[in-house]
């Protein structure tokens, strides 16, 4: 798909200068929807058609507001300036601005690069006026070049959408297997097991199968461009998967720094919600500084580090961990709370098989995420290079 996109680039050989024109002179129709909306129930016999802009429509008749292809943006609120494509018969609310015309794929990308949010004003409820959108002066090439550029970006957008669906599918697959491969509440065996594996899982307190440490105090202000790799608790929410194999933040070593040996399981000791800190990651490599606000668990030989991280982060064990969290605006959990968490453990060989399975799924998710981000960066770069 991307190679096809790149071929379009080399075929785009035009010499005519782009001209500055108002959107109203290029688009066939720029306006605000007509239907009035209020809260209610959609998909009722009284609203047997697509409704854009709210949850239901009042004061409507059987006629549609518009037909055909549209570019749409919310006129009021947090979504004002976000762009959407739509094709078909539709009722459009009076809080939505629509654009119709030729070469809509080109217009979509042009407005995407311009960033319509810059037209919004107001703080509580940002507002975009259709009248300002009509008079928006931008540069346009000839229609043939518009069509070719539009086709290129539509092809690229299709590739991005397909890869996003693939990523969503992988995440959904993982969530489904997590439900099936760990025992549910009141059960002692999972519903899906590997061939030849039998026997009930046994209950053990976490404190019976692990030792505990606390990370030493580091903050963002301690980070340096080079130095010893360091993990700060905040990055567990956004930057790391269940198994941490690469660390890209650094700091200088201190006298009482806690350094990983490899295989430690780390859990945030504070966060905004119980769900935030009811998660665990494995530090797979030695020599990493473990910063403050980290609970550090060192499992013994009866439990796999990777399995422990997966079981703490999902299902019944995660719910039990959440119940032990303390606080309101900022929540906390300590090693003393973790020691009493009840685990359900299979044999070490089954733990290893489950861990390897989910690590493989996580690697696929990470690779797909990276591919998607590369495609989005590619699109952003083309938007910068291909428009005046």
Image (cartoon, grey):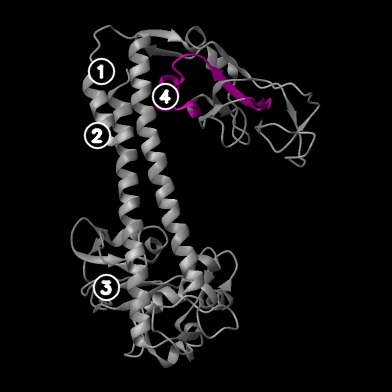
Residue under circle 1?
12
Chain-order first, disc 3 or disc 2: 2
Seen in the image, is 349 located left or right of residue 67? left
* Magenta-colored stretch includes residue 106: yes
Q: Secondary structure at mark 3?
A: loop
CA distance for labels 3 and 2: 37 Å
x, y percent for residue 266: 37, 74
Residue under circle 2?
3
Circle 2 crowding by C-alpha within 10 Å: few under 14, some 14–19, many from 20: few
CA distance for labels 2 and 1: 15 Å
Give residue 377's mark.
none
The reply to whether dot 4 and dot 1 touch (C-beta < 8 Å) is no
Q: Closer to us: mark 2 or mark 1?
A: 2
CA distance for labels 4 and 1: 21 Å
* Magenta-colored stretch includes residue 349: no
Chain-order first, disc 1 or disc 3: 1
Which residues, given as a range, are shown in magenta?
89-117
Q: Closer to us: mark 4 or mark 1?
A: 1
Residue under circle 3?
284
Give residue 114's mark.
4
| Residue lying at the far left of the rendered structure | 226
Up the image or down, 284 lies above or below 342; here it is: above
Q: Closer to us: mark 1 or mark 3?
A: 1
Quarter of the figure with residue 194: bottom left
Q: Closer to us: mark 3 or mark 4?
A: 3
Q: Closer to us: mark 3 or mark 2?
A: 2
CA distance for labels 1 and 3: 48 Å
Chain-order first, disc 3 or disc 4: 4
CA distance for labels 2 and 4: 26 Å
Residue occupying image coordinates x 27% and y 73%? 284
Residue 150 in view, yes or no: yes
């Amino acid at each position: 798909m991307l190679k096809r996109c790149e071929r379009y680039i080399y075929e785009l050989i035009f010499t005519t200068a782009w001209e500055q024109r108002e959107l109203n002179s290029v688009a066939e129709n720029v306006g605000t929807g007509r239907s009035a909306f209020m809260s209610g129930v959609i998909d009722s016999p009284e609203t047997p058609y697509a409704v854009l802009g709210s949850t239901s429509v009042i004061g409507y008749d059987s006629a549609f507001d518009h037909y055909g292809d549209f570019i749409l943006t919310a006129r009021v609120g947090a979504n004002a300036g976000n762009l959407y494509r739509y094709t078909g018969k539709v009722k459009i609310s009076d809080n939505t601005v629509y654009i119709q015309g030729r070469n809509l794929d080109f217009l979509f990308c042009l407005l995407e690069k311009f960033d319509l949010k810059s037209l919004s004003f107001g703080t509580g409820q940002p507002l975009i006026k259709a009248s300002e959108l009509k008079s928006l002066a931008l540069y346009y090439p000839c229609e043939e070049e518009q069509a070719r550029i539009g086709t290129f970006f539509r092809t690229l957008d299709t590739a991005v959408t397909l890869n996003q669906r693939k990523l969503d599918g992988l995440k959904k697959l993982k969530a489904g297997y997590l439900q099936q491969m760990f025992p549910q509440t009141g059960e002692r065996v999972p519903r899906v097991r590997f061939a030849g594996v039998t026997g009930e899982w046994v209950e053990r307190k976490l404190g019976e199968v692990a030792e505990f440490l606390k990370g030493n105090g580091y903050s963002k202000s301690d980070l340096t461009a080079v130095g010893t790799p360091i993990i700060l608790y905040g990055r567990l929410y956004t930057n790391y998967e269940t198994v941490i194999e690469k660390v890209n933040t650094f700091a200088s070593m201190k006298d009482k720094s806690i350094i990983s040996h490899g295989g430690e399981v780390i859990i945030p000791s504070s966060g905004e919600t119980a769900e935030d800190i009811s998660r665990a990651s494995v530090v797979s490599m030695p020599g990493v500084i473990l910063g403050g606000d980290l609970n550090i668990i060192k499992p013994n030989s009866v439990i796999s580090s990777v399995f422990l991280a997966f079981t703490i982060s999902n299902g019944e064990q995660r719910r039990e961990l959440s119940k032990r969290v303390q606080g309101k605006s900022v929540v906390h959990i300590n090693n003393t709370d973790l020691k009493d968490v009840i685990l359900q453990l299979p044999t070490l060989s089954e733990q290893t098989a489950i861990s390897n399975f989910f690590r493989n799924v996580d690697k696929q998710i990470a690779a797909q995420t990276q591919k998607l981000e590369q495609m989005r960066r590619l699109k952003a770069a083309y938007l910068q290079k291909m428009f005046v």
